């Protein structure tokens, strides 16, 4: 096989893989754990970036009340904040200085609108801080919004919905986002499960304390 033929075969294979990914895999990756209604819903923080070029909506059920879940959201971020409850070693390879804690950090439980949380080169500002209901940050350039919504299902169960919205103005940005999407699922799935574990443990501890 000569070089021109090999390049043609490689290009066709790459194109086929890209089409297959977009058609069969991309939607499950971007909507892991979320119901169709949650994916379609308008959620707190959507208005911060109404015209998004990319969106992911992922969710998990937590056997704890919203007040046991929200503290872990309020304190997320690099040290001295509480971390991101995912694979710290991967985050720290990127220089993010994440150290996930199993404790509620009282000093970060009253986040202020406009407060900065630095995520490497991304400086995120707190845009929504509604205890027990929603928490959202927006990048200073306005191109990324990361929002969490808490929905109480009953007196002891919460749906935690994580939504990312991106503005991807350039074609190269949109193409570059595609290989990042599977990786973002790996990290965010671990994060959601980490929050679930911590919230349920907090609920068990608090419910065991006599009123």
Image (spheres, rainbow, N blue to C red):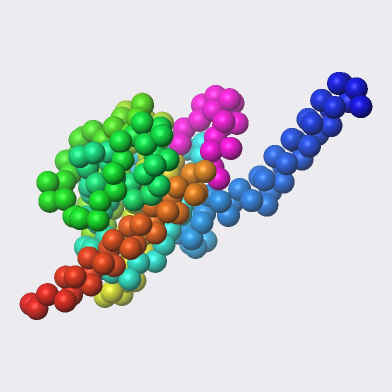
| Residue 188 place in picture, x, y as percent | 43, 49
Please identify the dominant SS of the magenta region: helix
Q: Is residue 64 visible?
A: yes
Q: Quadrant of the N terminus?
A: top right
| Residue 89 place in picture, x, y as percent | 39, 42
Q: Residue furthest top?
A: 3
In the image, taking residue 27 as reference, residue 46 lies left or right, namely left
| Residue 155 place in picture, x, y as percent | 26, 75
Numbered disc total: 0
Q: Residue furthest left?
A: 211
Judge by depth and name the residue closer to the eye, 169 or 103.
103
In the image, taking residue 10 as reference, residue 139 lies left or right, namely left
Quadrant in the rendering for residue 176: top right
Examine the rendered structure and indicate whether residue 38 appears above or below residue 49. Answer: below
Residue lying at 48% horizontally and 44% vertically, measured from the top left: 184
Q: Is residue 163 visible?
A: no
In the image, taking residue 18 as reference, residue 160 lies left or right, namely left
Task: Look at the image and give the residue range highlighted in magenta.
Answer: 166-182
Q: Is residue 168 magenta?
A: yes
Judge by depth and name the residue closer to the eye, 113 or 58.
58
In the image, taking residue 149 as reference, residue 114 lies left or right, namely left
Q: Quadrant of the C terminus?
A: bottom left
Q: Is residue 28 magenta?
A: no
Examine the rendered structure and indicate whether residue 128 appears above or below residue 11. Answer: below
Residue lying at 31% horizontally and 30% vertically, measured from the top left: 123
């Amino acid at each position: 096989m000569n070089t021109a033929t090999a390049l043609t075969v490689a290009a066709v294979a790459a194109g086929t893989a890209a089409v297959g990914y977009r058609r069969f895999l991309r939607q499950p990756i971007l909507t892991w754990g979320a119901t169709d209604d949650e994916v379609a819903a308008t959620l707190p923080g959507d208005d911060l970036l109404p015209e998004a070029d990319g969106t992911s909506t992922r969710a998990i059920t937590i056997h704890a009340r919203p007040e046991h879940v929200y503290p872990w959201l309020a304190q997320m971020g690099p040290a001295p904040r509480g971390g991101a409850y995912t694979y710290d070693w991967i985050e720290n390879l990127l220089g993010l200085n994440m150290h996930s804690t199993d404790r509620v950090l009282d000093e970060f439980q009253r986040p202020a609108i406009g407060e900065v949380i630095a995520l490497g080169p991304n400086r995120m500002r707190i845009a929504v801080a509604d205890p027990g209901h929603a928490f959202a940050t927006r990048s200073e350039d306005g191109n990324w919004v990361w929002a969490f919504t808490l929905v109480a299902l009953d007196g002891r169960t919460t749906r935690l919905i994580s939504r990312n919205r991106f503005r991807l103005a350039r074609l190269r940005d949109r193409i570059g986002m595609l290989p990042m999407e599977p990786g973002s699922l790996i990290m965010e799935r671990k994060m959601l499960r980490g929050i679930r574990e911590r919230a349920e443990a907090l609920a068990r501890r608090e419910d065991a304390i006599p009123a």
